[in-house]
């Protein structure tokens, strides 16, 4: 029983650490981004990806070619939505620029990754979105830490009283 307790505690600590790291590493679109690797939970169906999927995308802008489908951030009308589009033209200057549908030009900063290179895990996106949200982070990470702190404080105060009596 003790081994199971330590395994569960270790899992909780690793998960809380990962969630905290994801929150600290959020990009300008609100998703966790570590260099060219992005973690995101989908809140809508997009192409072959279903709502609630957890996506792990590695952006390799140099390997994107004409005809590839890419996942990108569409911030039209101040909405940060994730979209899929086919690349019609690749322009390379000081940075990569892609021409996608309707003559729209897309900077490499908005590219999440090439559709074929993205790993999708169904349903885990709901959990990721909840845990990285305000309420989920408070309930899952901050509240247990606060309760643990209060428990330790109470235990310490009780030990102090025992030492005073002796």
Image: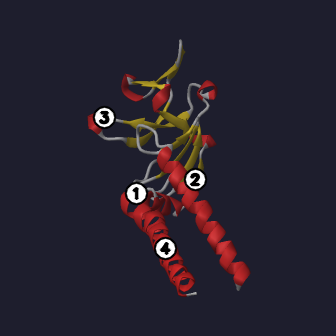
Q: Which residue is mark 3?
A: 76
Instruction: Classify residue 133 by image quadrant.
Output: bottom left
Q: CA distance from mark 2 to mark 1?
A: 20 Å
Dot in front, 2 or 4: 4
Q: CA distance from mark 3 to mark 1?
A: 23 Å
Dot in front, 4 or 1: 4
Residue 133: image tag? 1
Q: Which residue is mark 2?
A: 120
- Tell me, yes or no, if residue 120 can be seen here: yes
Q: Which residue is mark 4?
A: 153
Where is residue 49 drawn, in percent x and y? 50, 52
The one nearer the camera, 90 or 156, is 156
Is mark 2 in CB contact (under 8 Å) with mark 3? no
Where is residue 160 drawn, in percent x and y? 53, 79
Residue 63: image tag? none
Mark 2 element type: strand
Mark 4 element type: helix
Is mark 4 in CB contact (under 8 Å) with mark 3? no
Eyeballing the image, is 125 above or below 71?
A: below
Is mark 4 in CB contact (under 8 Å) with mark 1? no
Query: Which image quarter is the C terminus in?
Result: bottom right
Q: CA distance from mark 2 to mark 4?
A: 43 Å
Q: CA distance from mark 4 to mark 3?
A: 51 Å
Dot in front, 4 or 3: 4
């Amino acid at each position: 029983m003790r081994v199971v307790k330590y395994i569960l505690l270790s899992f909780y600590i690793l998960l809380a650490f990962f969630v905290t790291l994801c929150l600290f590493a959020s990009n300008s679109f609100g998703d966790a981004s570590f260099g060219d690797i992005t973690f995101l939970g989908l809140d809508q169906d997009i192409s072959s990806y279903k709502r609630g999927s957890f996506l792990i995308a590695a952006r390799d802008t140099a390997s994107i070619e004409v005809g590839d489908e890419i996942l990108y951030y569409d911030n039209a009308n101040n909405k940060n939505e994730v979209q899929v589009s086919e690349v019609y033209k690749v322009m390379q200057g000081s940075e990569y620029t892609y021409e996608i549908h309707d003559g729209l030009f897309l900077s490499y900063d908005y590219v999440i990754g090439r559709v074929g290179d993205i790993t999708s895990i169904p349903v885990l996106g709901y959990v990721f979105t909840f845990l990285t949200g305000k309420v989920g982070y408070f309930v899952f990470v901050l509240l247990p830490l606060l309760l643990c702190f209060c428990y330790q404080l109470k235990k310490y105060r009780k030990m102090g009283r025992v030492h005073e009596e002796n």
